[in-house]
Amino acid sequence: LVATKESARRICENACEVIWTVEPDSPVCNSDWDRDTAAAAYRIVVEALLNAIKHGQAETVAIRCHADSIVIVDDGNGFDPAAVESNRFGIRSMKGRAKLVGQAVEVTSEPGGPTKVTLSV
């Protein structure tokens, strides 16, 4: 969690505000959390933040760590997920990383926003 928060701070700098909510029963609080799943979660959070800033021009990103999920919601301008070209790598990489560790990522958005990335954990 510490590394993810530090990376989020560096990624966002002055571009956006990150608001964290971490429930005590979230696996991100567990030092014994599976290393591969933790690494996948880290990479997915980083990718979601980069997309929120680069593509969505988000000013605020909320990261909520629950017992069964990590949810990243931004206030950016959103997009139509059905219109994303197949050669785009961001969403595919998040879904692929989750699948490799037996989890799933769902991305929901619409033009005008918000965009929500949910990783099951």
Image: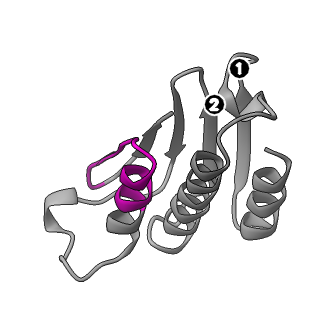
The amino acid pointed to by label 2 is: Cys
Residue 105 location in percent, x, y? 37, 46
Q: Which mark is residue 23?
A: 1
Q: How is the image coloured?
A: one colour
Residue 44, given in percent of the width and then of the height, sits at 53, 57
Residue at the extreme left of the image, as rendered: 82
At x 51% / y 42%, what residue is drawn? 73
Residue at x 67%, y 29% (from the top left corner): 27
Q: Nearer the viewer, residue 18 or 2?
A: 2
Q: 10 Å neighbourhood of mark 2: few (<14), some, or many (≥20)?
A: many
Q: Residue furthest bottom?
A: 87
State how far apart marks 2 and 1 are (Cα). Answer: 6 Å
Find disc 2 in the rendering and name its residue. Answer: 65
Residue 99 % position (x, y)? 36, 51
Segment tinted magenta in the rendering: 94-111
Position of 75 with respect to 62 (left or right) is left
Answer whether residue 36 is magenta in the image.
no
Residue 13 drawn above or below residue 66? below
Query: Looking at the rendering, which quadrant does residue 116 occupy?
Result: top left
The location of residue 49, given as percent across then percent down, is 58, 60
**Image: 34 above or below 92:** above
Label pair 2/1, CB-CB below 8 angstroms: yes
SS state under label 1 = loop
Looking at the image, the residue that sits furthest to the top is 25
The residue nearer to you, when weighing 96 against 118, is: 96
Amino acid tagged 1: Glu
Which secondary structure lies at badge 2? strand
Residue drawn at x 51%, y 33% is: 121
Q: Is residue 73 left or right of residue 98?
A: right
Query: What residue is at 64 percent from the left and 47 percent from the top?
Result: 38
